Amino acid sequence: MRYLPHTDDDIQRMLRVIGQPSVEALFAHIPDRLRAKRPLDIEALDEGALLEHLGDLGAHNVPSMGATQRDGAALSFLGAGVVPHIIPTAVDMLLQRSEWYTSYTPYQPEVSQGTLQAVFEYQTMVSEILGLGVANASMYDGASAAAEAVLMAMRVTGHKRVILAGAIHPHTTETIRTYLSAEAATPAELADVCVIVPSGDVGSDGRVALASLIAALDATAEVAAVVVQTPNFFGVLEDVAPLAKAAHDKGALLIVANSEPLAFALIEPPGAVGADIAVSEGLGLAIPPSAGGPGVGLFAARADLVRQIPGRLVGETVDKDGRRGYVLTLATREQHIRREKATSNICTNQGLVALAFTIHLSLLGKNGFREMARLGLAKAEYAKSTLAAAGLPVAFSGPTFNEFAIRLPAGSDARAVVARLADERLFAGVPATADGLLTNAALDRILLVAVAERHKRADIDRLAQRLREVCS
């Protein structure tokens, strides 16, 4: 099937009209080092082979249930970026209504009122959860939202450097570095633009070492933003207010990243403790995680920064007859305005996942949202004490929410322990030094364990028992 049905003659006629010698010339503004010089290594498959391949990929998705559920189901304590929660069946039932499938980008508000209202409700919820005045219509995922927040801070301040402080998720760090690589021609220049206070540079409580951050700010001129995460990669809740003061004293914005928005049901939201921009990953409250697939990036900022927010915003208004209606209030992306004036090249948003997030939170309500958080916190605290009694203490003394790091006994390697238990469909957690995460050998015995409202006491007891047995 041809996805680009233009003939060679069609292409030549279009090139003559715009005054370009070739299609290749259209991409001349892209630096040569960033352009692919080889064909994509994609195997051509017939329909039967393609369906079989997709089935093989789908088989990697293992249903995650409690230890008391049917044989063959997995017991999972995986987190490290997405903590899965119980998603009511009603979310799927509402999400599958045909109206949502036919609605794409709401360029024509008069025929897209339902989609626009759903986005408006989503924005309102995100604004309340993150404690900031305005939220956009969602982004691809939490990591790219963090990178877009950094670019926004650069536009707002006019500065070109960013400091990533403490235990930020390594994938978020790498995504930000990838975005900022456009600002640098060499690794040395990138290191100058993107200053990293190492993830290992945290105190015994697992929090950002404030002295290290202040030292980095003192040593770095023209800082656009400081990025911190709470709960951080080790699950520890950061004390954000002094970090915000340190950033603001140097004229920088504070960006707070997060991978568990449920935490803000119980702790003060980023906007209340000094954040200028806050981002999060909402996947765990929207749809089950899978081997790949979409996320949904929550993005909110101070109301006075609204003109620099990437993506788009939906607003509420009234028509000439005084009836309530919804419109695309702000759309500062390349599809809508001239490229040089765009705040982002984001071309869409994760609308369907954002809708699932919105439906779930609507069903919960504020009280249900807090109750889910309290239940998860209580179970996580039970898990911490149970694991400690089994000789597997928490690695850091700082307060946590529903994810925490434990330290395995001397001589244990978290990756080997996790691999052994995975053979019996018990996914005990994520090793801090798993592929693509941290590379500090001192963290080889650190295992990140995520506990939520979906876990039962029997699940947690089984985890502690099997970890103790394997580690001994």
Image (cartoon, rainbow, N blue to C red):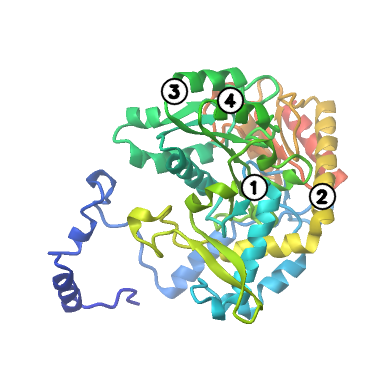
Residue that carries the numbered disc 4 in the rendered image: 246
Q: Earlier in the sequence, mark 3 or mark 1?
A: 1
- Residue 45 in percent (x, y) is at 39, 68
Q: Residue at 63% across / 64% down in the picture?
A: 120
Q: Earlier in the sequence, mark 3 or mark 4?
A: 3
179 horizontally vs 247: left or right: left
Q: Are marks 4 and 2 in contact (CB under 8 Å)?
A: no
Q: Secondary structure at mark 4?
A: helix
Q: Secondary structure at mark 3?
A: loop
- The disc labelled 1 sits on which kind of residue? Leu
- The disc labelled 3 sits on which kind of residue? Thr
Instruction: Indicate which label's residue lies in the foreground, 2 or 3.
Output: 3
Please determine whether, in this image, residue 320 is positioned above or below residue 444: below
Quarter of the figure with the N terminus: bottom left
Residue that carries the numbered disc 2 in the rendered image: 370
Q: How far apart are labels 3 and 4 at the CA level?
A: 13 Å
Instruction: Indicate which label's residue lies in the foreground, 2 or 1.
Output: 1
Please determine whether, in this image, residue 140 is positioned above or below residue 190: below
Q: Residue at 40% across / 73% down in the picture?
A: 46
Residue that carries the numbered disc 1 in the rendered image: 132
Q: How far apart are labels 2 and 1 at the CA level?
A: 19 Å
Number of residues whose C-alpha sits closer than 10 Å to that of mark 3, classed few (under 14), some (14–19) or many (20 or more): some
174 horizontally vs 232: left or right: left
**213 or 88: nearer the eye?**
213
Q: How far apart are labels 4 and 2 at the CA level?
A: 31 Å
Q: In the rendering, which numbered label is found on residue 104? A: none
- Residue 192 in percent (x, y) is at 38, 27
Q: Earlier in the sequence, mark 4 or mark 1?
A: 1
Q: Are marks 2 and 3 in contact (CB under 8 Å)?
A: no
